[in-house]
Image (cartoon, grey):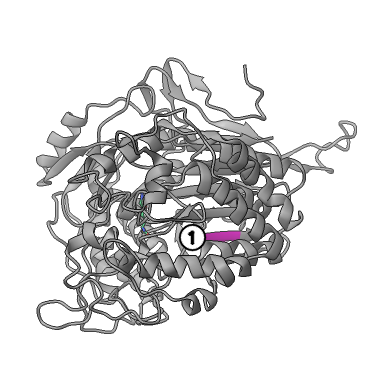
């Protein structure tokens, strides 16, 4: 039996019951983990262990995040790393302030709006130098540590460095993803291989003798990564953005074997993170705060919740009731119509942030929801919108991961971190993979009428994201929930649904994660197949039929989320002293309740 303070995947037998009384016979499902002091949830047990260790020795949420990110870049390399970007929503307890940190990758200064026109479609652009944005993660680690770290910077790199030198077991998920991409190659021969065209990445992830993925359990050493970590630990982020590492990144991009890119060492040298105000929306008495542009996450999650709140008449009694799914998916249609039309990097294009979350505007939009599917939603006209513009309706593939941390000091950190698609652009430099984030831009700068797309490529611009790191505050302004997920543009639905499951249906984070997802990104309604022992069993076909009778076109799909959630419950308890004085000396006690996504290798750690 594992100690509660270690990595946990506890399992319940029998009845699944929420605090609303909704019950489902569901066999063995993961149950929530509770701690009192601190908690970290990530998509990998080694990353969670590193974060939990840093918290245990007195580190802050930021300290733990640095250890977690550097380990994730090693052990879940397909999802995030030094070569990628991230968004953080951070609650600073001492200042009682919430900020967001934008460490999104940037287009090089030489980028032009027709970058992807004629690039041969998404896959060819993805596996090329054109897709690589200037990475933001190393600068973000330093920025956060300078302001919110307690432990010495160098200390935080030790877990990843030791694992990189001693080796870590390759996970089944990583091995399977390598196999999937290798199988998509027309030929495995050098020069003909598209996926893992870079010989360094190929030799690391595959056996060159027979072109197969290294099997799960293989002890993977990454000495180049250990060396990069040593340089960062010693010299700070400048070791990455200047000097030989920057030189090698630029060289790899410009010398890409498929299509050369244009990133320069100057682009790297100039990279800065941007601190932005959070985008917040009230929901059922809570304040839901997320990432604003260039992410569409905070706005779209806020819109979905705001639209739902305006239609309590259409809400169902449980998370899988057809009424709930219908309302959620209609709100999704409306939110995606606005997102696609209006959201881009607000340092370059006007985004009507306040207007999109304006309550009268959302009331007007919510009135469009009826008992039957509305079909394709048109964008609305939120206050402050500047037109005409054209939508970017591209749906992105699923390489991203979410980290939730609460420390003993009361700080909360919600970070979604990414290299975009699986294994980024497939090129490895100094032990880390380069991202393909720029494929998050619209491939065409205009629509057929010549109207400009807000999310078109421009020099130094950041591509629109769907990443939705979120912190929810209760009516007293206390942190109530830390949540977020990977999943491409599905992130928005996963995150919004996790909040509805907790706030509306009283589920704890693990129960909330165990519910299969549903969503509509202004196209087909997707519902997820259950996974025995991982998600709630339910009759997906019966739900699909009920939705079809409401006019939906429905797809039953495989699951692909990766939610990491922490709920914070504060309750007062009588302090010490005799009965006479009890109540006068009340103490507030905190309970942290964690849920991880066992669809991935999610784990909860802490004490
Ligand atoms: O920023 C974004 O929205 C995407 N680059 C995220 C990609 C993603 O989540 C892939 N996931 N599994």
Foreground pick, 589 / 211: 211
Instruction: Residue 600: give x, y in percent of width and height.
Output: 42, 36
Name the residue tied to disc 1.
Answer: 86
Query: Which residue is more in the foreground, 589 or 252?
Result: 252
Q: Is residue 565 left or right of residue 95?
A: left
Residue 520 percent across, percent down from the top left: 23, 51
The reply, left or right, for residue 49 in relation to residue 130 is: right
Q: Residue at x 51, y 51 (%)?
A: 431
For residue 84: magenta? yes
Q: Residue at x 70, y 44 (%)?
A: 55
Q: Establish if 450 lies above or below 373.
A: below
Report the magenta stretch's main SS.
Answer: strand
Q: Secondary structure at mark 1?
A: strand
**Front residue of 587 and 134:** 134
Tell me which corner region of the image, top left, top right, bottom left or bottom right, holds residue 344.
bottom left
Q: Quadrant of the C terminus?
A: top right
Location of residue 305 in the rendering, given as x and y in whole percent from the top left corner: 37, 56
Crowd band around label 1 with a 10 angstrom C-alpha radius: few (<14), some (14–19), many (20+)? many
Q: Is residue 449 visible?
A: yes
- Ligand 1 is found in which quarter of the picture? bottom left
Residue shown at 40% from the left, 81% from the top: 109
Q: Provide residue 368's location: percent of width, then percent of height.
A: 19, 62
Q: Is residue 124 magenta?
A: no
497 vs 533: above or below: below
Looking at the rendering, in which quadrant would you find the N terminus? top right
Residue visible at 46% across and 52% down in the picture: 80
* Magenta region: 83-90
Can residue 592 be seen in this snapshot?
A: no
């Amino acid at each position: 039996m594992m100690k509660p303070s270690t990595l946990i995947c506890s399992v319940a037998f029998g009845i699944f019951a929420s605090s609303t009384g909704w019950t489902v016979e569901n066999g063995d499902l993961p149950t929530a983990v509770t701690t009192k002091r601190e908690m970290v949830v990530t998509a990998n047990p080694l990353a969670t262990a590193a974060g939990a260790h840093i918290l245990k020795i007195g580190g802050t949420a930021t300290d733990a995040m640095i250890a977690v990110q550097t380990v994730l870049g090693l052990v879940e390399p397909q999802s995030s790393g030094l070569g990628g970007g991230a968004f953080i929503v951070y609650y600073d307890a001492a200042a009682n302030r919430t900020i967001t940190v934008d460490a999104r990758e940037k287009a090089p200064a030489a980028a032009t709006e027709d970058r992807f026109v004629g690039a041969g479609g998404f896959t060819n652009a993805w596996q090329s130098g054109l897709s690589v944005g200037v990475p933001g993660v190393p600068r973000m680690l330093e920025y956060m540590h300078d302001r919110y770290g307690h432990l010495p910077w160098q200390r935080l790199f030790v877990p990843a460095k030791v694992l990189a030198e001693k080796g870590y077991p390759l996970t089944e998920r990583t091995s399977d993803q390598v196999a999937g991409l290798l199988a998509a190659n027309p030929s495995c021969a050098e020069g003909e291989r598209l996926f893992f065209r870079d010989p360094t990445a190929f030799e690391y992830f595959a056996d060159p003798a027979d072109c197969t993925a290294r099997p799960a359990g293989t002890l993977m050493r990454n000495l180049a990564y250990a060396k990069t970590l040593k340089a960062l630990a010693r010299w700070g982020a400048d070791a990455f953005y200047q000097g030989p590492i920057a030189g090698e990144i630029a060289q790899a991009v410009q010398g890409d074997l498929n299509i050369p890119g244009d990133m320069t060492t100057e682009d790297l040298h100039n990279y800065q993170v941007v601190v932005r105000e959070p985008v917040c929306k009230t929901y059922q008495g809570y304040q839901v705060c997320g990432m604003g542009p260039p992410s569409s996450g905070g706005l779209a999650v806020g819109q979905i919740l705001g639209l739902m709140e305006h239609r309590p008449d259409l809400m169902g009694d449980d998370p899988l009731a057809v009424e709930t799914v219908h309302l959620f998916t209609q709100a999704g249609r409306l939110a995606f119509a606005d997102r696609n039309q209006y959201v881009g990097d607000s340092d370059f294009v006007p985004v009507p942030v306040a207007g999109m979350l304006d309550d009268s505007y959302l009331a007007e939009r919510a009135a469009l929801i009826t008992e039957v599917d509305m079909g394709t939603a048109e964008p609305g006209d939120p206050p402050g919108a500047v037109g005409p513009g054209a939508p970017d309706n591209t749906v992105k593939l699923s390489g991203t991961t979410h980290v939730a941390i609460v420390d003993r000091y009361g700080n909360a950190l919600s970070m979604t971190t990414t290299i975009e698609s699986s294994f980024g652009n497939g090129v490895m430099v100094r032990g880390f993979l380069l991202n393909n984030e720029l494929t998050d831009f619209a491939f065409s700068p205009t629509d057929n009428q010549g109207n400009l797309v807000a999310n078109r490529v421009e020099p130094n611009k950041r591509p629109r994201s769907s990443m939705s790191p979120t912190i929810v505050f209760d009516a007293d302004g206390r942190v109530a929930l830390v949540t977020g997920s990977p999943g491409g543009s599905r992130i928005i639905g996963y995150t919004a649904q996790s909040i509805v499951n907790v706030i509306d249906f009283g589920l704890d984070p693990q129960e909330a994660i165990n519910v299969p997802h549903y969503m509509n990104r202004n196209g087909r309604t997707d519902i997820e197949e259950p996974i025995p022992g991982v998600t709630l069993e339910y009759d997906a076909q019966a739900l699909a039929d009920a939705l079809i009778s409401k006019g939906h076109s429905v797809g039953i799909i495989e699951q692909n989320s990766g939610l990491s959630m922490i709920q914070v419950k504060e309750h007062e308890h009588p302090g010490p002293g005799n009965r006479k004085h009890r109540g006068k000396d009340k103490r507030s006690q905190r309970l942290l309740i964690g849920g991880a996504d066992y669809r991935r290798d999610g784990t909860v750690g802490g004490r």
